Image: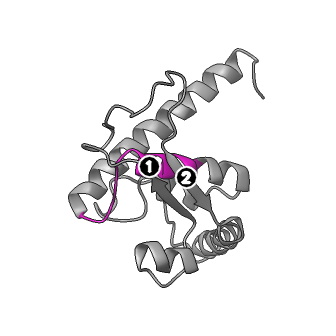
Amino acid sequence: RELNKDYRDVDGPTDILSFPFSDAEEPGQLPEPDFDFPDFYCLGDMMISVPYVMRQIENDRLYFSSQKEENNAVDPHDSLSAQFSDTRGVSGAMATEYNLEKRIGLLLIHGMLHLIGYDHIEDDDYLVMVKREEEIIDEWKNRIATLQSAGEVS
C-alpha cells in the first residue's frame, strides 16, 4: 500500500507494481540499450504483494461461488461482456484462477507489459494492453498444451 501511494499516488493495496528502467518509445518498443552486453537486458523491477494476492484469491473464490449459488452465472472470461471491464485480459483470466503460482504467472505477464511500455490508464491504452495480454495468455496456453501432449510437462 505504501509503495502504491508513493509511486502511483493510489492510497490502497495492489497486487503488482512495475518499475521500468527505460521509457518505451511506444508499447512494446524499447530503445537500444546503452551498454554492450548482448545477452543481458534488464527491463526493470517488479514487486508482487503475495499476501494481497492470496486475499484476492479468497475474495474471488467467495464471490464466484456465491454467484453460482444465487444462479447469477458470471463468466469472467466472456470477452463479449462490457468493453471496459475487468473480465478481459489478465484480470479476467485471474478471476477464477485460485492457484497462487498460476495467478502470479498471470501477474508477471501484466507486469512485464508495463515494463515494456504498456499501460491501462486511458481507455484506448487499456484496450491495447488487454489485447496483448490475451494474445500472450493464449500463446502460453498453447505452448503448455503442446508440452503436455508431448509428455514434457504434466
Give residue 32's position: percent from left, percent from top.
Answer: 34, 31
Q: Is residue 30 above or below residue 20?
A: above
Q: Which residue is mark 2?
A: 45
Q: Residue at x 38, y 47 (%)?
A: 22
In x, y percent, where is residue 37?
Answer: 51, 25
Is residue 111 shown in magenta? Answer: yes
Q: Residue at x 56, y 55 (%)?
A: 46
Disc 2 and disc 1: Cα gap in Å?
Answer: 8 Å
**Where residue 57 sits in the image (x, y, percent)?**
67, 66
Give the residue furthest to the top: 150
Q: Residue at x 37, y 42 (%)?
A: 132
Name the kind of residue labelled 2 in the image. Asp
Query: Is 131 placed left or right of 37 in the picture?
Result: left
Q: Is residue 52 one of those drawn in magenta? A: no
Verify CB contact (< 8 Å) between mark 2 and mark 1.
yes
Image quarter of residue 10:
bottom left
Q: Is residue 52 left or right of residue 107?
A: right
Is residue 1 shown to the viewer in this render? no
Q: Would you name the residue on which mark 1 appears? A: 21
The boundaries of the magenta stretch are 106-122
Q: Nearer the viewer, residue 40 or 2?
A: 40
Q: Toward the viewer: 96 or 28?
A: 28
